[in-house]
Amino acid sequence: MSWHAALQLDYTLENGRSVARYRHDGPLRILQSLYPEGDAVCHNVLVHPPGGLVGGDTLDIQLSVAAGSHGLVTTPGATRFYRSTGDAASQQVHARVEDGARLEWLPLEALAYPQCQANNKAVFDLAPGAELIGWDVTALGLPAADQAYTQGRFSQHLEIQNLGGLNAEVRAPVWLEQGRIDATDTRLMDGPLGLAGHRCLGTLFFASGTAIPRDRREAALDAVRAALESGALSSAATRDAPALVAGATSPHPQVLAVRVLSPLVEPALDLLKRLRGVWRRELWQLEATPPRTWAL
């Protein structure tokens, strides 16, 4: 039997406090709101009790962040896409961030099991004055269990849109990345212009509802590049996975991005967590406060 779960999570600012309210249908929950850095930022953990998705399962997550509020969403573990011989399993996220609001979308990795059929889609609508820090991390196969990703298909879709104009519902495209990782595509999986043998890929991104001023954009890129050059890459590597590579760029005047390739997910996530902290300090003048579940 397929699981279909939906969740609506809404952040509002009430008397100086960011407050989260949600409603759900099916096995998808938000744990208690936490405030490890004061009332301004509300931390939440998104939980899917079944623990993974099989063919035909669907997770539908809708987020809204009202003006002035700041929401942070993470997960307690990987989103697992299990083996399927039929229908694809799908996760779709659609977030709307209003003027003056901030969202941090920081789920742990999407884990593609061998022989999975999976779709993973995230769309973020940003009003003028809205800002977003997020990441997308995908791990292919189970290398620690000697289960290589030699069969399966994993489709990805990451999109950022502007909200604005005379009609507040009008959406204008800003940044779109999509593709399909087919385990049998050896040129993609192992070629020097593809994944080059790596089995974890990640993107950390910062996006704004309007063009980021050039000096602010360059300062943010310089900060993460300095972190990489000063040893973040080597400190994120392990004895078993020393070959992690990363780089930072601005693919659009409203977007900053850090790309990471790694043989394993752990050093990639460790690096992205560090660099998220760098951007938090540089762009928002906030400490690199991690969600409490990351310490578990």
Image: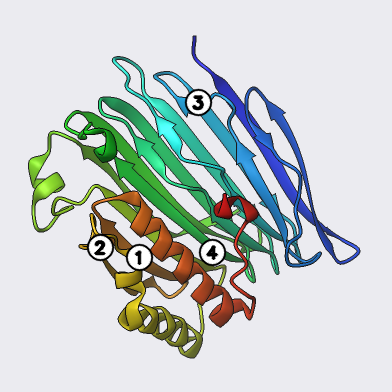
Q: Could you say which quadrant of the image residue 88 lies in?
A: top left
Q: CA distance from mark 3 to mark 1?
A: 33 Å
> Which of the marked residues, 4 or 3, is nearer the chain's N terminus?
3
**In the rendering, which numbered label is found on residue 133?**
4
Examine the rendered structure and indicate whether residue 161 appears above or below residue 50. Answer: below
Mark 3, other Cα within 10 Å: few <14 / some 14–19 / many ≥20: some
Amino acid type of the residue tagged 4 in the rendering = Ile
| Residue identifier under label 3 | 58
Q: CA distance from mark 3 to mark 2?
A: 32 Å
Element type where label 3 sits in the image: strand
Amino acid type of the residue tagged 2 in the rendering = Leu
Mark 2, other Cα within 10 Å: few <14 / some 14–19 / many ≥20: many
Q: Name the residue at 50% across, 48% down.
A: 123
| Residue identifier under label 1 | 236
Q: Name the residue at 22% across, 62% down.
A: 242
Q: In the image, 123: left or right of 18?
A: left
Examine the rendered structure and indicate whether residue 69 appears above or below residue 180. Answer: below
Q: Which of the two discs, 2 and 4, sits closer to the camera?
A: 2
Q: Could you say which quadrant of the image residue 165 lies in?
A: bottom right
**In the rendering, which numbered label is found on residue 190?**
none
Q: Position of residue 229 (x, y in %)?
A: 31, 82
Q: CA distance from mark 1 to mark 2?
A: 8 Å
Residue located farthest toward the top when viewing the structure as drawn: 1
In the image, 253 versus 93, the foreground residue is 93
Q: Are marks 1 and 2 in contact (CB under 8 Å)?
A: yes
Q: Name the residue at 35% across, 58% down.
A: 268
| Residue 276 in sight | yes
Element type where label 2 sits in the image: loop
Amino acid type of the residue tagged 3 in the rendering = Thr
| Residue identifier under label 2 | 244
Element type where label 1 sits in the image: helix
